[in-house]
Image (cartoon, rainbow, N blue to C red):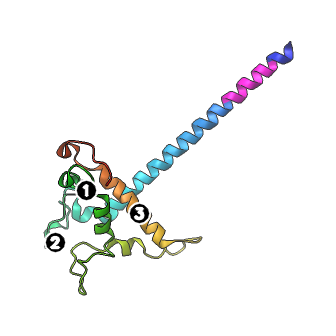
Amino acid sequence: MRSAGWAKHGMRRLAGKAVALAALFVAAGIVMAQARRDAGERTYKTFCASCHGAAGKGDGPMLRHLVQAPTDLTLLAKHHGGVFPSLRVSDSIDGRSSRENGPHGSREMPVWGTVFRAPAAPGTVGPRDPEREARQRLVDLLDYLSRIQDRSATGRDSNQE
């Protein structure tokens, strides 16, 4: 009878370890998702905030030096029927296929797709895919921009296009 008690005890311990392991995987997934979200915010603060402002309102410190005021990025969904225009915003940020790019760079906003695709920093180890990295940075940035939409201005949750 004693062996049946030990077997039950062993099963409980195994079940407890399985639950702990599952909790660890869930926590790791949450941490990884948060890191992706933070990547978009970091990209925004590094490349966009100087013109569009810390909160995306178009009031960055470079405003006085620009010919055209930057877009209030928090109102993109409002101006598109309550839906965040991810494809349009992606094309505008990337800029590599824009028709606005004349031979003299007539586009006011930088072509970030080229910047995001830049070579690795000195000392970077391992194989790289610069185009994939540029796309991921753009996806992270789009995620961040979709999250800063003024929900009160749209009247509904702004879904991706």
Residue topped by disc 2: 66
Farthest-out residue, bottom: 103
Q: Amino acid at mark 2?
A: Leu
Q: Amino acid at mark 3?
A: Arg
Residue topped by disc 3: 137
Q: In the rendered structure, which segment of residues is drawn in magenta?
A: 6-16
Q: Amino acid at mark 1?
A: Ala
x and y, in percent, of residue 31 in the image: 49, 46
C-beta proximity under 8 Å, tags 3 and 1: no
| Inter-mark Cα distance, 1 to 2 | 17 Å
Which secondary structure, mark 1?
loop
x and y, in percent, of residue 67 in the image: 13, 73
Q: First in sequence: mark 3 or mark 1?
A: 1
Indicate which disc residue 54 carries: 1
Asked if residue 22 lies left or right of residue 137, the reply is right
Which secondary structure, mark 2?
loop
Which secondary structure, mark 3?
helix
Q: First in sequence: mark 2 or mark 3?
A: 2
The question of residue 14 being in magenta is answered with yes
The dominant secondary structure in magenta is: helix
| Inter-mark Cα distance, 2 to 3 | 25 Å
Indicate which disc residue 154 carries: none
Q: First in sequence: mark 1 or mark 2?
A: 1
Relative to 102, say whether 41 is above or below.
above
Asked if residue 131 lies left or right of residue 160, the reply is right
